[in-house]
Image (cartoon, rainbow, N blue to C red):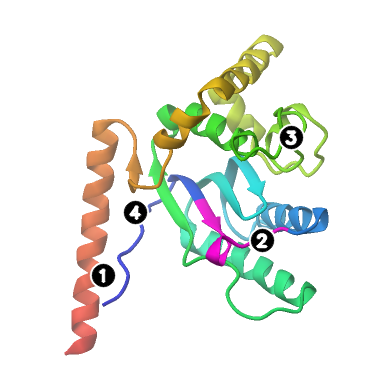
Amino acid sequence: MPRGPRIAFENAFFHVYNRGVAKQKIFLEDSDYRYFLKRVLALKTKKLYDHEIYAYVLMPNHFHILIQTKKTPIAKVMTSLLTSYSMYFNKKYKRVGTLFQNRFKSKLCDKDSYFLGASRYIHLNPLEAGITDTLESYKWSSYQELYGSLDLNILSLESIDRLVGKNIKEKEAYAKFLEDGISNINVLIQDYRFDREVEGQPKFNTLSQKKYLRRKNKNMKQFITTLN
């Protein structure tokens, strides 16, 4: 029996997550974090795939990304990224075998209602893990692109500006919103688990599920045809 298709369609917004096999580290040195981010950037700037990045964090043994795809399926974008990074990591550290735990997880989201809370949860990951005490001091998150010194320009800033505002006061308000979540990290963890495939308002969820079921039924019919 084939795996069920991901809930995906054009112009879809996803929260993507994966971690190392057996929770092992996937980033051992600063150069590993930077290579991963450069691969994310390469997919964007070389226009191999049409997508936008809204937020990300790289942790020692996992990562989170908020990404909006256009015509290219999320599976194709992420498979390209993870395969490239796995080859780099295995060659560098003279290892063989799978680097990531199973296939990556992706949750289809209603961007307008999901972005603010999810981006806060993502940026607070290093604090929840006890790696750092402040948002400013962690090097490998999109917070550094927004307010720090990371120079890779991975984020789709114009799209983010439409969600949080682009003048100084609006950006300061967003930064405060992120910081205010520090006292509520444990609750945020519960809110942004991957126990649901779709996250959004009821109407969004219903429409998404209908599209998913049509695609799932088509996939099943194709599978049955191959058996006959």
Q: CA distance from mark 2 to mark 1?
A: 33 Å
Q: Observer-nearest residue: 223 or 130?
A: 130
Q: Residue at x 77, y 40 (%)?
A: 139
Mark 4: which secondary structure?
Answer: loop
Tell whether label 3 touches label 1 (CB within 8 Å): no
| Residue occupying the point 43% across, 32% down | 114
Answer above or below: position of 21 versus 184.
below
Query: Which residue corresponds to mark 1?
Result: 219
Q: Which mark is in front, 3 or 2? A: 2
- From this view, report whether residue 152 is shown above or below residue 6: above
Q: Give the numbered dot on residue 26.
A: 2
Give amino acid for label 3. Answer: Glu
Q: Earlier in the sequence, mark 3 or mark 4?
A: 4
The residue at which mark 3 appears reads as 145
Question: Under tag 1, what secondary structure?
Answer: helix
Q: Are marks 3 and 4 in contact (CB under 8 Å)?
A: no
> Which numbered marker is on residue 57?
none
Mark in front: 2 vs 1:
2
Query: What residue span does the magenta drawing correspond to?
Result: 17-27
Q: Quadrant of the C terminus?
A: bottom left
Residue placed under numbered mark 4 in the picture: 7
